[in-house]
Image (cartoon, grey):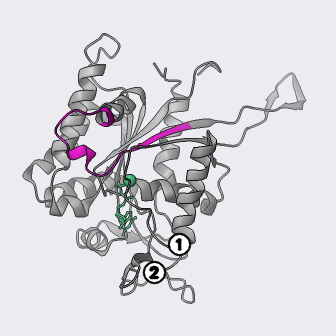
Amino acid sequence: MTDAEPAPDIAMWGASGSGKTAFLAALSIALNRAGTSWRLVGENQASGAELIRLRNRLLDDRMFPDSTESLTYYNWLLIGAAESRRQWWRPWRTLPGRAPRIRLDFLDPRGGLYAEEQASVDKEALVASLVRSRGLIYMFDPDRESRVGDAFKHLDQALNEVAGQMLVGDEFADGKLPHYIAVCITKYDDPRVLMLADRWKLAEPDVNDDLRIPRVDEDRAREFFHRLCRHGRSHNAEMIVDLIETYFHKDRVRFFVTSSVGMYIDERRRRFDPDDFLNVIDDPQKGLMIRGAVRPINVMEPVIWLGDMLSSRSMRSG
Ligand SMILES: Nc1nc2c(ncn2[C@@H]2O[C@H](COP(=O)(O)OP(=O)(O)O)[C@@H](O)[C@H]2O)c(=O)[nH]1
Ligand SMILES: [Mg+2]
């Protein structure tokens, strides 16, 4: 990518209530916790203020962000560490390198927009953001799918519209959309989701993690997703994986099992307890509250993966 070209965008897609805003709120917490050199900053003052507001909502108020009332744009930049360079003929001199930057242009639609049949300005903006981006975060909420079962319908509609705009010309002659797509199963901490992973023998305690939180191995995340789709309310859901792999290059699709708040861990025992891991509790006065520390699971990983893919492939943003 040359300096003149703007970094490609990462866009987000998912049904209302699937956990998009919570994911965004958890992103900077995840980056801080991991001690990475990546920093998240607002590209303008409003986006910066929103970043802090969302984070404080989880950390200080111990609540989830309110459901989105209107279409909200977040313009954030993920800035990595610059690697200094040496030239072999002058190895004693180091030159400052350029810090990698990933533009996160998140558009958080109001609840219900996905389900609206009629065209609207907001819906056009949403499709436009998918067309403009080269990285997608697709949020799949297994709980919603087991109750409502409309993920296939909405994804099919959206991809149809995006493909209608992108694939008619000659630019993508192979007939596939050019995006990298991170398919994120959300709310893994929810007992209904974790229990399924456990029942299907897909979750195992991570031996590299002192807390021994059960994880679904990266290699098995696609299988978990597929099984969750088949487990859902709608028979169409089992076609979601095929749908994704028909529209996108198979090697540009990756699956992540995510949770924005993570599991509850008793700070004295500091071990995952299968009988006491609920981190979201229903307070009679305040509603849903976050009980313990916020330990996001696979929230930063999909974003950094997309960023790496986009910057290494020097994809054009046009
Ligand atoms: N247990 C659990 N619940 C979550 C998580 N993320 C979101 N939720 C729940 O899902 C609701 C909707 O999330 P939100 O981020 O507003 O969804 P959006 O409409 O896609 O932006 C929240 O109010 C929470 O109750 C998570 O990581 N774990
Ligand atoms: Mg939202």
In this view, the residue in front, 202 or 74, is 74
Name which quarter of the figure residue 99 lies in.
top right
Q: Position of residue 195 (x, y in %)?
A: 27, 74
Verify whether residue 112 appears in magenta: yes
**Amino acid type, mark 2:** Phe
Give the residues in magenta.
103-122
Element type at marker 2? loop
Element type at marker 1? loop
Distance of label 1 from label 2 (alpha carbons): 24 Å
Of the residues tagged 1 and 2, which is closer to the observer? 1
Verify whether residue 139 appears in magenta: no
Question: Which numbered marker is on residue 61?
Answer: 1
Identify the residue at image location x=66%, y=59%: 35
Q: Position of residue 266 (x, y in %)?
A: 51, 86
Task: Please name the residue that numbered disc 2 is placed on.
Answer: 272
Q: Quadrant of the C terminus?
A: top left
